[in-house]
Amino acid sequence: MRCSFCKKDAVFEARYAGRFFCRNHFLSMYWKRVKRHIAKTELVTSGDKVGIAVSGGKDSVVLLHIFHELFAKRPDIRLVAITIDEGIHGYRPYGVKVARANCEKLGIPQTIVSFQETFDNTLDKIVKKGEWALTKLTSKPNSHKNLQERTPCSYCGVLRRYLMNKVAKELGCTKLATGHNLDDEAQVILMNLFRGDNQKLARLGAKVGIKSFEGFVQRIKPLRVVPEKENALFAMLSGIEVDYHVCPYAHLAYREEVRALLDSIEQNHPGTKFTLLGSMDKIISSLKKNASAEGPGVCKSCGELTSGDLCQTCAYLEMINHG
Amino acid sequence: MKGLLTVKIKQVPGKSRILKVPKGTTIDEILGKLGTHRDRVIVLREGRPVPESTKLEKSESLDVITIISGG
């Protein structure tokens, strides 16, 4: 196979565009797309201190390198890295090590915080405590919703987002950048559609949320227009060290079912993931208008912002600690 | 099995496998036999990424790197 632009050996086929790319043309296309997205959505502006969520996986490490390339020399923008150690045996230590190595290489200060030191629990311990619940709930009819809420990924996601926001605030960040890619975004659109959760759909976008609130650091997703595979290829072709260990709990996630469905459709209809994201972006502004944007209250337990009496993190911790 | 190509596959993570396939089989078709999908892996031939629509014309070795990791 030859590059559609220069006839060198192709390393990648973008079926959604009907084109083949050699190494250099792939990297050029990749940079062009990411830069255009960041500029068009005004994700980073003068005066920003950006916290970059770095797990050590390909998406977040690539994001770290891209932001370093784009912003490290700008005196009006500061970059810091935030790494969360969830406590997943045989998985997370590798990611933390790779994240640290990349931050050191680029000279970006890194803060590492763990579930253990913050919640007095690792995800492994939480999963172990929750096994009884999984066993009990699977035997009940119509238990899907409860079961979903108790999968490891649900706990992990809520606790990790809480911790990310907390650390970003403590560091004085004005933005929190995450490495979510096109596949992540397409999956979450379908998951929220299937669940009928319009409120969560309305929060999607390059800038996360319906409106900004003091206490929530604005989350941004600079790589949401990049297919997951292209982040991996970018890392590989750029010689960036990333961690490819597979999370032992990933197969339990609802997301995994949706991923398989989307991949299957994409196989027969290339470009579906882009189309899904594009369609959602077109209707997202009206969804935001219709969604409830009432200001949050304060969690009676931890003082963080919440829409109820108890924030989801404290509700989960209550469940984890007291069953 | 005369006329079949021998393809040595190293899956990362995973086991190594040997497949016998007809000449002209695409890498995409091989991924299907492995139960995976082109969006979940990068396929390397002689250490270089190759497009999945590449047709195999001779017996050779491929590395299949799984790139998805989280939930």
Image (tube, coloured by chain):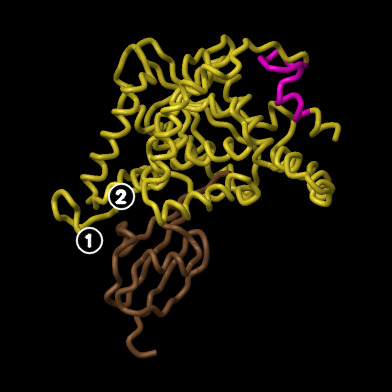
Chain colours: A yellow, B brown
Segment tinted magenta in the rendering: A301-317
Q: Tag 1's secondary structure?
A: loop
Tell me the quarter of the image containing the N terminus of chain A.
Answer: bottom left
Tell me what residue is drawn at x 32 percent, y 32 percent: A34
Is tag 1's residue or tag 2's residue first in the polypeptide sequence?
A: 1
Instruction: Please tell me how crowded label 2 is: few (under 14), some (14-19), or many (20+) other residues with Cα within 10 Å.
Output: some
Q: Is residue A49 magenta?
A: no
Q: Tag 2's secondary structure?
A: strand
Tell me what residue is drawn at x 27 percent, y 75 percent: B57
Q: Is residue A304 magenta?
A: yes
Amino acid under disc 1: Met
Q: A242 or A297: nearer the eye? A: A297
- Chain letter behind tag 1: A
Residue A108, by quadrant, is top left
C-alpha separation, residue under disc 1 versus residue under disc 2: 12 Å
Above or below — where is A52 with respect to A236? above
Task: Using the image, tell me which numbered label, if any, was put on residue A14.
Answer: 2
Residue A42, by quadrant, is top left
Above or below — where is A81 with respect to B67? above
Residue furthest out toward the bottom: B2
Tell me what residue is drawn at x 41 percent, y 14 percent: A48
To the question of a shared chain for discs 1 and 2, the answer is yes
Instruction: Please tell me how crowded label 1 is: few (under 14), some (14-19), or many (20+) other residues with Cα within 10 Å.
Output: some
Disc 1: which residue: A1
Above or below — where is A138 with respect to A102? below
Q: Position of residue B13 (x, y in %)?
A: 51, 59
Q: Position of residue A5 (x, y in %)?
A: 15, 48
Q: Position of residue A185 (x, y in %)?
A: 48, 36
**Residue A310 in the figure: left or right of residue A323:** left
Q: Position of residue A19 (x, y in %)?
A: 24, 50
**Residue A289 in the figure: left or right of residue A151:** left
